[in-house]
Image (tube, rainbow, N blue to C red):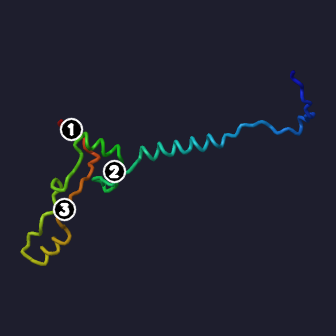
Amino acid sequence: MIRRVPQPPLNPALRGREQHDFWAGFVVVLIGLLLVVCGAKHLTAVETSDGGTASETQLVKALSFGGLQFPEQVAPPPPPRSGDPAALVQWAQKNPAPKWKVRVDTAAAAPCPT
């Protein structure tokens, strides 16, 4: 048989308020927004023709619109016309052979031919 256990009297003024804490949800939403913003603006190690660093979306757009530049496409400045060997040496020091590097042309607008 069930027997009732006597309960102590409750004073409503001394009871703790039931409240919902929003900080945990707020922090989770803030971290989510931060990840979305950082993921959308994720930078790559590829430099742009403007001199900055390309984001992933710029890299994908350049790949699909033919905006990738390779070193053999970017012509170095012409050597000096004078026959001065010192000027040629100085030009060679300022303009070494291009390393294999890809640049993103952010102004490319021609669609990919494939």
**Residue 59: percent from the left, percent from the top?**
30, 46
For residue 39, side relative to residue 86 (left or right): right
> Which residue is outermost to the top?
1
Instruction: Please tell me the numbered disc located at residue 54.
Output: 2
Report how far apart the C-alphas of labels 2 and 1 lie in the structure.
19 Å
**Residue 103: percent from the left, percent from the top?**
26, 53
- Residue at 90% in and 34% down: 10
Pointer 3 residue: 98
Instruction: Please tell me the numbered disc located at residue 85.
Output: none
* First reached walking from the N terminus: tag 2 or tag 1: 2
In the image, what residue type sits under mark 3?
A: Pro
In the rendered view, would you say 77 is above or below 63?
Answer: below
- Residue at 19% in and 62% down: 98
Pointer 1 residue: 112
**Residue 68: percent from the left, percent from the top?**
23, 48
In the rendered view, would you say 84 is above or below 72?
Answer: below
Report how far apart the C-alphas of labels 3 and 1 lie in the structure.
25 Å
Dot 2 crowding, Cα within 10 Å, few <14, some 14–19, many 20+ = many
Q: Quadrant of residue 50?
A: bottom left
SS assignment at label 3: loop
In the image, what residue type sits under mark 1?
A: Cys
